[in-house]
Structure formats: C-alpha cells, structure tokens
Image: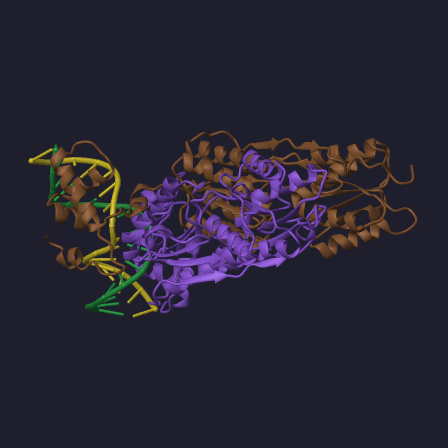
Chain colours: A purple, B brown, C yellow, D green
Amino acid sequence: MTDTARGTARRYGTRPTMKDVAARAGVGLKTVSRVVNGEPGVTPDTERRVQEAITTLGFRRNDSARILRKGRTASIGLVLEDLADPFYGPLNRAVEEVARSHGALLINGSSAEDPAREQELVLALCARRVDGLVIIPAGDDHRYLEPEIAAGIATVFVDRPAGRIDADVVLSDSFGGAREAVAHLIAHGHRRIGFIGDQPRIHTAMERLRGYRTAMAEAGLPIDASWVALGSTAPERVRAAAAAMLAGPEPVTALFSGNNRVTVTAVRILGERPRPLALVGFDDFELADLVSPAITVVAQDAARMGRTAAGLLFRRLDGIEEPPCRVEIPTRLITRGSGEIPPEDV
Amino acid sequence: MTDTARGTARRYGTRPTMKDVAARAGVGLKTVSRVVNGEPGVTPDTERRVQEAITTLGFRRNDSARILRKGRTASIGLVLEDLADPFYGPLNRAVEEVARSHGALLINGSSAEDPAREQELVLALCARRVDGLVIIPAGDDHRYLEPEIAAGIATVFVDRPAGRIDADVVLSDSFGGAREAVAHLIAHGHRRIGFIGDQPRIHTAMERLRGYRTAMAEAGLPIDASWVALGSTAPERVRAAAAAMLAGPEPVTALFSGNNRVTVTAVRILGERPRPLALVGFDDFELADLVSPAITVVAQDAARMGRTAAGLLFRRLDGIEEPPCRVEIPTRLITRGSGEIPPEDV
DNA sequence: CTGAAAGCGCTTACAG
DNA sequence: CTGAAAGCGCTTACAG
C-alpha cells in the first residue's frame, strides 16, 4: 500500500489505475497488465489476488493510455450528410456491424452538406487518430486529407467520389439506375418526362441527369430545357419545379425524381392532382407500396454500400497494397404502379 | 535536429510529433504546444517558424495523448437500439448537435435490443473514458454502471428508464399518449379495441398498455384477454396477433398499435382488408398522411428527447449536483383519418 | 513466473 | 517570452 492517497481517496472523478491495483494486490505493474489482458504466465493464486484487487477497487483499464502506447485506436470514423436521414440509417448500421466484428468503435457525425463542416469533422477524427474513415463527402476537394492518408489513416469514400485525390470509393450505379428508370417511363409511352434532382454540385445528381439524358437520347426524344430542374430538395423548390413542368400547353406526363426527399414531395404533388401523372423515384422508402398508386422506384442497397465500404476499409488496415478502387453497387428497378401509368393524351 | 531518424523518415504510418516540430523549428517542446493551442506568450517570429515546421512536417496534434494528460476526452457515447431505425435518426442527430456545440465528438452504437450487447458496448465506451453516456437501454439492470458513474462518467437514459439504479431519464409520455389514443377511438364509437405492442420487458410497451387499460376503464369498457398482444414486432407476429383479434363473432373494430414497426404492418393489414378498421399508431412516420386512409398517430418528439437528454448530460458535466431527475416529453395526437373511422356495426 | 525501467505524445507546474 | 522536467496510465523490451 504505497499509494494510499489514491488507494483510499476514491473521490468522485478519480479512478483507480493499474498502479493502484498492483499496490493493493502486492504485485508488479506488469503482472496486473498480464491479468487484465489475459496474457499467460501468471500463477492462479497471483491472478486471483489481482482479480480481487480489480473488483474491490472498481478498476477498468484506460483505453486512452493503451491506445497511446499501441498506436492503433480500434476506432473508425463515419462522416455522413445527416444522421437523421433515413437513407443513411442502414448504411450507418452496416458500417457499425463491420467495425464491431473487427473490435472497433464507430465515431460518427453529420457534415450537414457543408464542405467546411465536413473538413472540420474529418480532421477532428484524424486528431483522435481513428484508424480509418468512411466518408460520404459534402465537399469536392479532399486534398486536405493527403497528409492524413500518407500518415496511415485508411479512407474510403461512399455514395460520391472524393474530390481531387485518388481514393477508394463505393458508389451506387446512379447513371445506370436513372437510365433504366427513364427508359421504363419511355417504354410505357411517355415522351415528355421531367427530372427533378439535387444540387448540380452533388455527383450523384449529375450522374442521374446523365442517365436521364442518355435514356432520352437512346429513344430519340428531345429534351426541353424546362423539363430539367436541379437544385435544393426543399419542398417549396420541388413544388415550384414541378408546377413549371406541368404548366403550359405541353406539360410533362411523367416525373423522374432524383432522390428520396424529392420523391416524398412528388408523391404529395401527385396526391393533389386531379389527373394522373407517372412517377419513378430514385431511392426506395418504407410504405412506397402502400401509397396509392404504389410508387415505382430505383432502389439502392444502402446497407450493402456500407458493408462494402467498411469491408474495404478494414482490408486496407490489414495492409493490402492495391491501388485505389471504385466499386459500383447495382440498383434495382421496383415496379409498383406509379411508373406504369400511361400518358394522358395517348 | 536531434531526432533525425523520425524527422526525415516520413515513412507510411509514422507521424511527426511535437518533438519533431520543436527540433525542426529550433524551439522547445512547450513553445510548440503554445502555438498549437493558441496560447499567448510567443513572439510573432517564433510562431511563424513553428507554423512553418508544422506545415512542412504535416503535423497534427495527437488528441489521444492530450486526452490522457487532460482527463476529459471531449467525447460522449450514445447507445441506441438500432442505428438503422428511422425513429432514432432525429434523436441521434439532436444529440450530435448538442455534443458539437460543446466541442465533443459522438461515438455511437446499437444494442440490437440485447442487454449483453448493451453492457459490452457501454463498458467499451467507459474504457475509452467518454465524458458521458446517453443510453436507450435494452437491459433492465444497470448496476454494472455504478462504478463508472461514481468515477464521474455522466449518464442520462432516454426513452426507457434505467434498471435498478437511480439515474437521469428523459421519457415520452407513453402512458398519457396511449390513453389519449384509445380515448379517441372510444369517442368515435369503438368498444372492442385491440392493442398490439412490443415485448413486455420493454418499459414503454407496459406504459402504453397501462394507458390503453386506463382509457378503457375510464369509459367503463371491459377488455377481453384476446385483445391484447405484446411481443416481437416482427411482421409475422403482428399479423398473427391481428388475425386472432379480427376472428370470431366479436372481432375488434379498432386497433391501437404500440410503435412504428407495428404500425407499418398494421397499415399493410388494413390495406388488405375488404372492410374498414380504425387504427391509431404510436409514433409518427413519414408519409403517414399519404396512405389512404391517412394514419392517425400519437407523435413523439424524438429530436426534443435527444436534445433534452444531451443538454442534461452536459449540465451534469458542468458540475450541477442535483439529484437524478425524470423528464417527460409530451406526445401529440395527430388525427388524419384512420383513427376517426367508426365501427362497422354501429 | 515476475517486475523495474523506458517510453507512447502530449500538458502541467515551475523556473529562468 | 521560453524551455527542461515530471507525469498522465498504460505497453514494450528486457532481465531476472
């Protein structure tokens, strides 16, 4: 009992350390370390004494100190757009499960679609020395990450590619999915199809626009400039965009909505209209099959994206030395009714 | 340049430290610390030299080491049931925002409704020395947390109270909400009302059952044992429970569903039935107003619960010494149609 | 089987 | 204004 001041004064906020346990059990520090970490080479009797000291003192190893010594923190960071967005829930959970299976904890945060906040968050995670990062990027310039990556922080981008650096990325096939969706509407007789998508600086928005354009071109259909509206996904903006497309002598007869937030508003608009309007939405959502008409969607597999990204991250942490790769997860068209409504005037 | 081996060998995985920066800038360690932390007492010229060394070396302070020395980790843990559950998204985000405003990072994980996993996760977070914990408990015995709380880890429970320890808790008014929902159905003429809820070991399930029973009793209505089904929220179980209540000569004419997962399945069942059935669900969900009939719900304010819990946590961390408190967040009945359907046989 | 010494990368308390 | 020494709580490398 050398360290009585600590050993006895179990005052609020002060925790026993291995040193306290060692003193109490009458053994050396290293022996405590062996018992705590289940290393071999301790007699059953010694082990029992140490365990007893651990229990009575309420000792719990301080992983911060351990981490400092060992190098790896056994934690990874996940930066996404908004923790409250249901689209990212399954992705978040999938990343967590992979981390858990590797004994790592998950620190996560929202960029709120703000590049400065993304960078601030990412660098805070780097300062905490997370072993790796899964990033759904908000910004389009990630050169700030170069020193971190060089220093060994594994990094995988998801949903959108990294900007101005070469890094692993896991994407949905936005182009293919959008093309299939629009081709589906065309196959059902539509010739005037509107596209309401996300901000043009968002990669997936541009990819989906490219899919829309390609499908139209492949069918030999012209695109009127008023049929395409990229911008905020706020309901008012989406309503205004839809209203513009549906006005005039040659209104669109079908709508392709570029993501789940747009789709939700589009569904509301449909419900308010007296005459039918076809709709295919990018992203599936719960109860899409219960709305009337049920909503035809291009479904992304968010959980698979998260699983793939996290799996790749841990492969990198295990030391594989391949060049950065780009994985594309296929989408799936789910026909439920709204995408199969024929145009009114045919 | 004392430490040339490190200073020059910027090999993959090795990061420069303050010592390297100090050597490069030709200053002492403490001066680097001052610059890095923006402390006063450094001449502009010295500061410039240090900044230069930081930039060329790509130095970023190791917060693990800082934490070890300072005591506080500026991180909090959030343990919820399932990161993929949309109900927790807004709560998660609200906790993050409060943490962020206090300069703290958020580590989170899912208990998967498994008490053992909850404990494992919570203790891992304690070992990392998070400053505080926000817990949506899966288990009903939290005595394992006592040494941690005594050691200064602030803890706030949300959505369900802690088991066998006295701790802060933020709850929805499950009892009041359920009572209001059932009273609403009764007011619309129903006398045989079914309740399908979560596992009986979950506190909110029992509170909602209590609300159901109270409302029935207050209206002088008897409750048939077959009208109450508590258990798993898996669709098959919910379907079976509903089928049992709707069979026989005296089927229920209205359903009160105990949470959002049950409600989703109940909505599907409604859609498949030829004859109308009234429904009020506990928990609101997106598009509840677009389903036909639109779904009447008892809405909880999950974001407010998260904000309240995290706010309380940081008040505790700031040292307030009040006894543990219990905060109840009111619910709100939103009438949309499904709860106002009269019974068939009236 | 056991333990004393050194060190992980910082901050604290102190002295110039 | 500046810096050398000690220490946060562990693990590593080594010696008995």
Counting every numbered tag in the picture gives: 0
- As drawn, is B141 to the left or to the right of B123? right
Q: Quadrant of the C terminus of chain B?
A: top right
Q: Is residue A231 above or below residue A98?
A: above
Between B259 and A219, the one lying in front of the other is A219
Residue A268 appears in view: yes
Res. A301 in view = no
Q: What residue is drawn where x is 54% and y is 36%? A: A234
User: Quarter-wise, where is residue B106 in the image?
Assistant: top left
* A86 shown above or below B334: below
Residue at (62, 56) in percent of width and height: A184
On the image, which quarter does residue A8 sit in? Answer: top left
Q: Is residue B107 left or right of residue B180?
A: left
Q: Position of residue B297 (x, y in %)?
A: 70, 37
Residue B217 percent across, percent down from the top left: 82, 34
Residue B184 position in % (x across, y down) = 78, 32
Nearer the observer, A255 or A60: A255
Q: Is residue A334 left or right of residue B225?
A: left
Give left or right: position of B198 versus D9: right
Image coordinates for residue A189, horizontal then vertical, percent: 66, 53
The foreground one among B257 and A5 is B257
Please tell me whether residue B84 is drawn above or below residue A266 in the rendered image.
Answer: below
Q: Nearer the viewer, residue B256 or B79?
A: B256
